[in-house]
Image: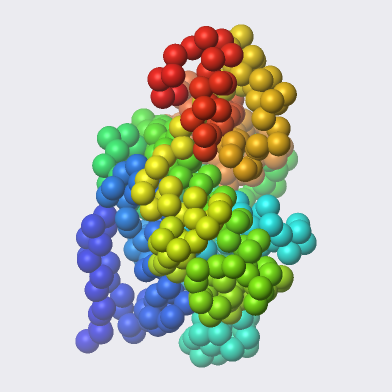
Amino acid sequence: MAILKRIRDPIHGLITFDLDDPVDGTAWELINTPEFQRLRRVKQLGVSEFTYPGATHTRFAHSIGVFHLARQLMSVAQRDVPKAQRDEPRERAALLAALLHDLGHGPFSHAFENAEKVRLPKNQYKDHEDWTGDLICQPGGNIRRILKDKFRRNGEVADEIAAMLRGKKQDLYSSVVSSSFDADRLDYLRRDRMMTGSGAGAIDFEWLLDNLRIVDVPANSGEDIEDSDGDTIQAFSFEEKALQAAESFILARFHLYSQVYLHRTTRGIEQMLTAFLLAFSAEASKGARADLPVSVDHPLRVYYANPTPDLDSYIALDDTVVWNALEVSAAKGNGKIQDFADRICSRKILKCVTIDIVNPQEADKARRRYIDENMKDQIGVSVFEDRANLAIYKDPSKETVKPHKRVHIRRDGGKVVDITSLSKPVAALYQEQEILRYYFANESDRVSVLNVTGESHAAT
């Protein structure tokens, strides 16, 4: 009789693990490592709870959901690909990569990474994907040990999973983890929508999955199937009757990015948190001379005291560590550290001015010119520039767009086409939208920018 473990999830219902199955059993052991359990203390949406109070879900729950969905996507590949052509080691690696894909996320992921980009030389900076690879491949680490014990291979499985997450080889199996229709997106779109309470971003997952097939598409980017030179690869595709559901899936990403991920309040809190971390790290780098309100063995202080980031001090960080530093700094700190900590803990939101740089009006040009001429020295100190690109679907004719980054539709006659040839709303997303906002620590500075064209002081 199979031994089952169960996790009840608000999105997917009951997620089961068959401990007699090599992949499920391994996944269960990986979930119960300290490295994976740390994700319970890293929120999926960082500071979004300041805007959406329900957005307190974690990367732990998300990662388990991604594994569950990866199994469903892989079942389509197992159904449609002849057994003789299947690569079972790659199947296994893809499923475990789905589980571990967020393992290296730091506290308040994006704000933390933004601070790291500023404070570290380019050759020392690591993003969460680099840290994930390091955690998986760490000699003597729990992840590598479990993979080695389970599959009797000397670290090769860990290396293959890390390489897949770094995009070293793109094929049908890696597309389960990273593609236009991957397990990661399928989970976060549904989970983030539910937990934020956003009315936007609904997708018909059951219909999409029921109409998902494996087809051959050109291996060369930018080619149409009928123009292919014969060099093809396998990829996921939807049947034509799922066109509207596929269109809604892509538009769901657009709506969630514009309404949730790039919300001006959330981005403003991220700017303050980045500023706090930069001020804290600058002081911590002084070592024993640092004037900080936390103890010398506080994990955030230990991490920043080391001029070169190391894995052990990095994985000691999570959201609770940063929150503790914020609360202590707000009560006992001084200078910029105390100021930004207090603003965050008290939710004293920075107000912003949005500049339209796609179709700028005279007011946009005048405000930007005023900031450039009068506030250059304040950028990063009391005035914060926030740039973001909203690029949901790229032009499939471009050579840089990989085949697995396209959404394919198999028409009723059997021809496989890119969704943009059938959907005007998706084709309209070709144009990348660039967002530019300036946040002001001093309201008088914001007012002076608005007054360049005589506008009112209402929140922008």
Q: Is residue 448 left or right of residue 50?
A: right
At a point 70% along the width and 40% down the height, the residue shown is 400
Of residue 19 and residue 378, the one placed in the foreground of this image is 378
Residue positioned 22% across, 87% down in the render: 1
**Residue depicted at x 43% and y 52%:** 342
From the viewer's side, name the closer residue of 228 and 133. Answer: 133
| For residue 82, above or below residue 456 | below
Residue 356 in the image: above or below residue 264: above
Q: Position of residue 44 (x, y in %)?
A: 41, 56
Display coloring? rainbow
In the rendered image, which quarter contains the C terminus?
top left
**Residue 41 percent coordinates (x, y):** 39, 67
Give above or below for 191 relative to 134: above
Residue 390 image-quadrant placement = top right
Q: Quadrant of residue 2?
A: bottom left
Name the quadrant containing residue 251.
top left
Residue 453 at least partly seen: yes
User: Residue at 57% across / 44% down in the picture?
Assistant: 405
Q: How many marks?
A: 0
Q: Residue 358: x and y, percent?
A: 60, 20
Residue 121 in the image: x percent, y percent? Answer: 76, 59
Seen from the viewer's position, the closer of residues 103 and 92 is: 103
Residue 234 seen anywhere in this rendered image of the structure? no
